[in-house]
Every structure is written in C-alpha cells, then in structure tokens.
Amino acid sequence: MRINVDGMLRTLVFGKMGTVTHGPVEKKPLHHFLPGALACNFGTAGCNLNCRFCHNWHLSQRKPEELDRYEVLTPKDAVERAKGRHASVVSFTYNEPTTFYEFMLRTAELARESGIKVNVNTNALMQEVPLRTLMKPKDSATVDLKAFDETFYRNVCEGSLAPVLKNISTMMEMDVWVEIVNLVIPGLNDHLDMIRDMCRWICSNAGPDTPMHFNRFVPAYRLTNIQPTPVRTLERARQVAVDEGLNYVYIGNVPGHVNNSTFCGHCGERIIHRVHFSIRAVNMKDGRCGACDHPIAGVWDGKWLP
C-alpha cells in the first residue's frame, strides 16, 4: 500500500475508495454505540494481515491496481458524502483501515468538526503513537480479536496477538468505546478453554461491560473446506463468556437469533429487540433499563431509537 520514493514512504491508496456504502451501525457490529444510527462506510485495498478466512478478501487481499474499480474522494468529499446521507457516524471498515491511515486520520478530524462520530473497524495491529493520534474519547472501535492464541495468529493470519491486546487496553484507557468481535471457526479457534481464557482477559482488562460478539463463520477465501459454525457452538461460547462475567454477549451472523438483542446486565430484561440489523423495539430511556433503571454501558442518543 506504500512505495519508497527517494527514502520517503508514500501511500498508494489515499482517497482511492474500493467501496463506499451506508447502513446501520449494527452492521459493524456496534450494539451499544448510537443504536439505530446510520453509518457511512469507507474501505480501500490492502491489509496488514493475511487471514485465510477473510470475508472481504476481494478488497483486503488486493493491491490498489488490482481493484476492479475505485472512487477517488478527498477527506472533505467523504464527510460531505456522510452528511448527504444524513449519517451520524463515519466508519472505516471492510479492509484494515491502518492501510489508509493518512486518509482516515484527516477524514476523522473533519468528521468530528462536523459533529459526526467516528468508528474504526480494525484488527488493532498498529503502533501506540498513531493509535493515540487517531482515536479520541467517545470514538468507537470494533476490534476483530481473531483468537486468543499466538499460534493461530501466526499460522492463520500471519500476525501476532500481543499487540492487539495491548491496543485494546490502550483504547479503554483513552475512553474509546470498544466492542470486540470473535469469528468462531470450527476446529481452529472454537476450543472452549481458549474462549474462556479470552473472556477472562476481556473481563479483567477491558471490563465486564465490554460487548462481546461471537460471529458465525461461513466458508470464504482460503477456508472454503470448513463448514459454517454450528449455532450450538456459538451458544456454548456465549455461555462461557457469561459465566466468566461478561454482561453483554451477542451471537452474530445468525439472523433472528435471540442473542442478537440486548438484555439488561442487571435484571435480564430485553431492552433492545433486534432482528439481524434491524431494531424492532426499545425498553430503555436515557441509557437506563426500562424495567429496573439500571445504567446500561454504551454511548446513547435517544433520537436514533424507534
């Protein structure tokens, strides 16, 4: 994604958007950050990992010149596009946004000036200084935690787990709203002992109110020989997370599953009823449970809720 020109690295993807879409923030997934709000999404080519299971490989595992098409936008254009869609969030997603860091940084700055929130959908593999430069309090990050195992990261993703954990802790320290996603792949990262260790770490280092999403794997890219994750496996993973103290645990990529909704971490009542990415009913007010008045962790704005 970069080239050395006379000793200086130059980006090859500034403003070259391989995809520009819009949709509910629930697709990130974000379940505790302006639920029901519209996000304008930007992505380009490239990644700093080579995950064999990538669902967006047609973008992330491509060089800029290999894209079938792209749209050239300036950061100002991107923010104006979000305004035109009446989006309250700009999201950098689809491929790893650190590959287009320069564009993301400037767009995020302009978005905040316009009162638009920022979401980064990331594998969290970056150095601390650019992370702190990019993220601000009350921004949001959807972190893809691939597994809780260095061997998995090395052999399946060609990366490392340790920097991811460090950066999750850094974002929590910065008061960034973090939701964690784990794509559960049969036979590779679905071992309950590994999931238990991961949930214990999250509970201790990010906090028990950190939303955890267990998403269903479907065959993609270089893992087309593995069957989709059994729903029962996701339900077992969720139960492990609840047993380890996490209050908001979701099952994703299973349309209609009851655990795509939000339940109060105190009384257990359903407070946001979702069907896939659609909000059907809400039983909360001013960030508190409508049944027991318990505060629900998140970044809320009632104007987006039905």
Image (cartoon, grey):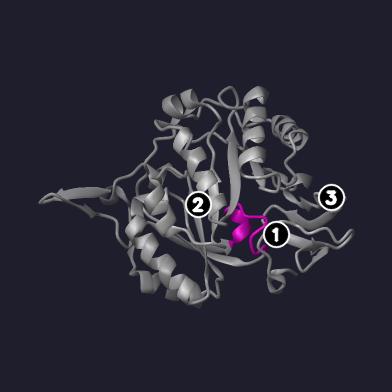
- 183 lies left or right of 56: right
Element marked by disc 3: loop
The residue type indicated by label 1 comes to Ser
Residue visible at 86% across and 49% down in the picture: 268
Which numbered circle lies on residue 266?
3
Considering every residue shown, the one lying at the far front of the view is 173
For the residues labelled 3 and 1, say whether their Cβ atoms are less than 8 Å apart: no
**Amino acid type at mark 2:** Asn
80 left or right, relative to 102: right
In the image, 278 versus 152, the foreground residue is 152
Q: Which residue is mark 2?
A: 121
Q: Indicate yes or no whether the magenta region holds residue 29.
A: yes
Closer to the observer: label 1 or label 2?
A: 2
Q: Which mark is residue 113?
A: none
Q: Is residue 223 above or below residue 109?
A: above
Point out the tag, 2 or 3, that comes first from the N-terminus: 2
Q: Quadrant of the C terminus?
A: bottom right
* Three-letter code for the amino acid on which mark 3 is drawn: His
List x then y, in percent, for residue 209. Answer: 70, 48
Mark 3 neighbour density, 10 Å: few (under 14) some (14–19) many (20 or more): some
